[in-house]
Amino acid sequence: MLWHIAYHVPELRKWLVANPKADAPLLELVSQRGGPGVRQALEILFESMEA
């Protein structure tokens, strides 16, 4: 289901970033495909990993 969202539902991609089941390959695809709020969601994720 997550991969389907990543490929076909751009308005939900930002929520995949927060999903604990989203692995690195899925997040890479989301990053490449973009969508509303994806960049901001990834920035928040990376900031939380640095803390």
Image: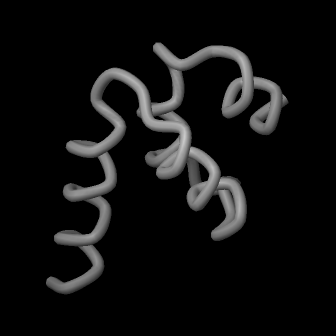
Give left or right: position of 34 versus 46.
right
Q: Dividing the picture into quarters, in which one does residue 23 lie?
A: bottom right
User: What residue sits 15% from the left and 84% below the top?
Assistant: 51
Q: How is the image coloured?
A: one colour
Give left or right: position of 11 versus 42.
right
Q: Which of 7 and 19 is in front in this view?
A: 7
User: What residue sits 80% from the left and 37% below the top?
Assistant: 3
> Residue 1, image x and y in percent?
84, 29
> Residue 40, image x and y in percent?
21, 43
Give left or right: position of 31 versus 46.
right
Can you say whether 45 is above or below 18 in the image? Answer: below
> Residue 16, image x and y in percent?
55, 39
User: What residue sits 81% from the left and 26% below the top?
Assistant: 4
Q: Dividing the picture into quarters, in which one does residue 46 lie?
A: bottom left
Q: Which of 38 and 32 is in front in this view?
A: 32
User: What residue sits 70% from the left and 24% below the top?
Assistant: 5
Residue at the far front: name it: 32
**How many numbered badges does the structure rendering display?**
0
Can you say whether 13 is above or below 50 in the image? Answer: above
Give left or right: position of 6 versus 41.
right
> Residue 36, image x and y in percent?
33, 21
